[in-house]
Amino acid sequence: MKVRKISYIVFLAFAVALFFAADSGVTVNGQVKQAQTPETAVSDDSGEVRAVWVSFYEYKGAGLKNKSESVFRTNADKMFRRIRDNGCNTVYFHVRAFDDAIWLSDNFEFSKYMGKNKPEYDPLAILIEAAHKYGLSFHAWMNPYRITQSKVYDPSKRSTNSRILLAVREVIDNYPVDGIHFDDYFYPSKGHKQYKKYASLSAGQKMSYTNAMVKSVYNTVKEKSSALKFGISPAGNVDYCTSIGADVRTWMSKTGYVDYIVPQIYWSNEYKIGKSKTRMFDQRLSQWKKLNTANIPMYIGLGLYRGGMKDSADLGWRKSSKVIASQISKTRRSAKVSGYSLFSYESLYKKTCRKEVKNMLSRISAVAISGGKQSIKAGETLALKASACPLRLGKAITWTSSDKSVASVSSNGVVKAKSAGTVTIYASWKNRKAALQIQVVS
């Protein structure tokens, strides 16, 4: 990953209701039986992807490098719980950054960023297990061509494609991942040590070789399972993508290349070009939406890491701490956008990003009461459950009744029907409120 790179409340309540599945129960004579849903049993059918990237350079900070199995398990659990608590439902986790592997492979060297030596336990297996425990979709993030920071495999060679497919097959054949994810590294760009080696190739030639690889990976993934996803996160600048062989126009106008795409639109709307400012985020977002003629599921990569950054060119990040919150709102209002991804995990707890994160969490916050319209008899008891998102903001929910003479509600959501009539039960959390209307009959 290159570092450059309806009522709204009703909508949120609906989304979180789908995000957190919960059961309710009704009994007679005051005996309440409520099905318990584990805190970690998250079900997300809302359709919105809320993802985060976990990069290879974050292993150490997350307590995953050179650790015993017990410590690794504890820290992996903590990391994914934190991701879940920040409202995310998807993780793009770096498993192959430099032609290496964080799984136990006979064909690829173990990642030095994960450990000095190959451990006795399998890190990837533990990571996937922990992610799934918290209801997170786990996509194995790979750099297809990169060998080192200054060396790449030649995309025109069949042996290169074979090498990439070998890594893909090892993962999808041996681990219950939910998808394979590529980032924005393709042909070397200007400034790279190997740029001159490929400078004689036209953009069309570069895209042709890259497309052959992308299509072969897509087919390999689909041969394994139609449920598996293959996605790419290209740079947010379309012209730059073309110059390095990322044929985003084809990937977004034809099927058979990717299941989803995540353009990295890491700019604010106060970007300076010369002496004038341009609404860079809005312009790029509009451009990508127009390119998506095949309606490929598209999630927008957001540069959370830039929170509070004093950038002389991109002034928005130091002028406002609501850039990400605003951008998420715009993705939610965009018909051709189905979610977002944050770069990256460590930014969720980085001091300079603290205000951005606080405003982002407030923007995506929502509370919902499980179940739909209920009808119960006087004397019956109804056990309700409310779910709040994101959990990082806390779990305390306040219950109230619009008419206590019809039905009261306890502090833990137990409704006691008293007399015939209609009552509305409210679950309040932070600045959000969910309502459930109940008909009490005699």
Image: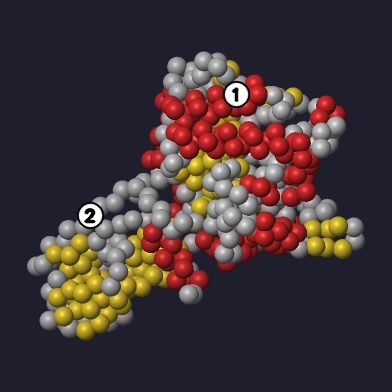
Q: Nearer the viewer, residue 139 or 93?
A: 139
Total marks placed: 2
Residue that label 2 marks:
35
Mark sitting on residue 162: 1
Residue lying farthest to the right in this orientation: 275
Q: Residues within 10 Å of mark 2 (few under 14, many from 20)?
A: few
- Residue 357 visible somewhere in the drawing: no
Which residue is located at x 30 percent, y 69 percent?
372
Which amino acid type is marked by label 1? Ser
Callout 2 amino acid: Ala
Callout 1: SS: helix
**Residue drawn 75% across and 36% down?**
206
Q: Within 10 angstroms of label 1, few (less than 14), some, or many (20 or more) residues?
A: some
The image position of residue 307, as x and y in percent, is: 68, 52
> Closer to us: mark 1 or mark 2?
1
Q: Quadrant of the N terminus?
A: top right
Q: CA distance from mark 1 to mark 2?
A: 50 Å
Q: In the rendered structure, which disc, 1 or 2, sits on the residue that comes first in sequence?
A: 2
Q: How is the image coloured?
A: secondary structure
Q: Secondary structure at mark 2?
A: loop
Residue 353, x across and y down, in percent = 64, 51
Q: Foreground residue, 211 or 407?
A: 211
With respect to residue 80, does 366 lie above or below? below
